[in-house]
Amino acid sequence: MTAETARPAGEWRGVELGSRVVDYTERDAILYALAVGAAAADLDLVFEERLRVLPTFALTLAQWAPDALGTRGAFDTRTAVHGSQRLEVLAPLPRSGSLAMTASVAEVWDKGSAAIFEVAVESDYFVATWALFAPGCGGFGGERGPSSPRRPEAAADHRLDVATAPNQAALYRLLGDRHHMHIDPAAAEAAGQPRPFLHGLCALAGTTLAVARRYGAHPADLRRLEGRFAAPVFPGDRLSVECWGADASAVAFGAAVAERAVLTGGTVSFG
Ligand SMILES: C/C=C/C(=O)SCCNC(=O)CCNC(=O)[C@H](O)C(C)(C)COP(=O)(O)OP(=O)(O)OC[C@H]1O[C@@H](n2cnc3c(N)ncnc32)[C@H](O)[C@@H]1OP(=O)(O)O
């Protein structure tokens, strides 16, 4: 055990995770769009002549930041999972280029048996926060932090069906998140799951695409996004998405697979 792994979870609060510049090409942006569920007919997302880059692609480029915290030993990377995500878009991503980012540990919440590490990433184009749910790291005497989001009580305004593909995690991981639990059955089992499960950000981005379509918004006009990964999504699952909201400027959403809630507390705005 290194000195950093011996550190109580609460002491990671405020730790700087450094800065990084990540390069990407139009090809990366197009592959990302396809990996999260864009169709061949979505020419603005998949054809270089008309390309607009999905803002959620930035989260893939920033994956180094939550990974840096795991690599430094804050938690066990075999069992920690992505718990929730927030994204605020500040400017459209260029079709290709270099993204400069800075990251730090914004908060650490003590859930008793687990800790939740919030990693904040800033750039000129977005600010985003990853919440990582780390079993076995709680009980350090910290604050409990936010509780589970509530489902709106009103009937949903729209219901959508979002299919995931059996090979979706295998494709999505090539964009940057190579955690083994998404591809290797033994690693998934070590994380407590019966088989490899889909990246939370892939399910969230695919759902966001479907919500944009239903509300007549362009997915590249995303302004804000938030959601909690309440249960794993397995590649090939079909998500039933419920949406609440009159127009694309403020939509709440949640998603379930059969009776299992998988995305909760979703909010998204386009404009
Ligand atoms: C490196 C990995 C990358 C990935 O992409 S992994 C794939 C995406 N993520 C997932 O598939 C995770 C799916 N979610 C889950 O499997 C479960 O969900 C959890 C294992 C994360 C938690 O489940 P449980 O241990 O049963 O937690 P509880 O007893 O329901 O709640 C304990 C406290 O933790 C808070 N909490 C629960 N889930 C989350 C979450 N997903 N994000 C943030 N906080 C969470 C609750 O509110 C509560 O706290 P309060 O008692 O204070 O309310």
Image (cartoon, rainbow, N blue to C red):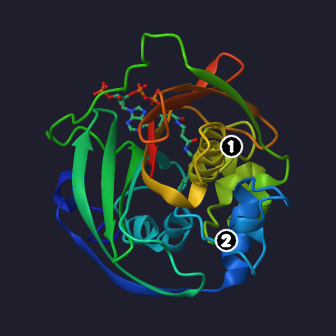
Do we see residue 265 in this rendering?
A: no
Q: Image quarter for residue 250?
A: top left
> What numbered label is drawn on residue 265?
none
In the rendered view, does 173 fall on the left or right side of 229? right
Secondary structure type for disc 1: helix
Residue drawn where x is 76% and y is 49% of the image = 185
Establish if 197 lies above or below 68: above
Residue assigned mark 2: 175
Single out the mark in the foreground, 2 or 1: 2
Residue drawn where x is 15% and y is 41% of the image = 142
Q: Residues within 10 Å of mark 1 (few under 14, many from 20)?
A: some
Q: How many marks?
A: 2
Residue drawn where x is 64% and y is 48% of the image = 209
Of the residues shown, which amino acid type is indicated by label 1? Glu
Q: Is mark 2 within 8 Å of ligand 1?
A: no
Residue 198 in percent (x, y) is at 68, 48
Q: Nearer the viewer, residue 193 or 217?
A: 217
Judged from the image, the quadrant occupied by ligand 1 is top left
Residue drawn where x is 26% and y is 71% of the image = 3
Do we see residue 161 in this rendering?
A: yes
Establish if 223 lies above or below 164: below
Of the residues shown, which amino acid type is indicated by label 2? Leu
Q: Nearer the viewer, residue 128 or 13?
A: 128
Establish if 40 lies above or below 24: above
Residue 243 in percent (x, y) is at 55, 27
Could you tell which of marks 2 and 1 lies nearer the N-terminus? 2
Q: Image quarter for residue 5?
A: bottom left
Residue 38 in percent (x, y) is at 75, 56
Residue assigned mark 1: 189
Q: Image quarter for residue 231?
A: top right
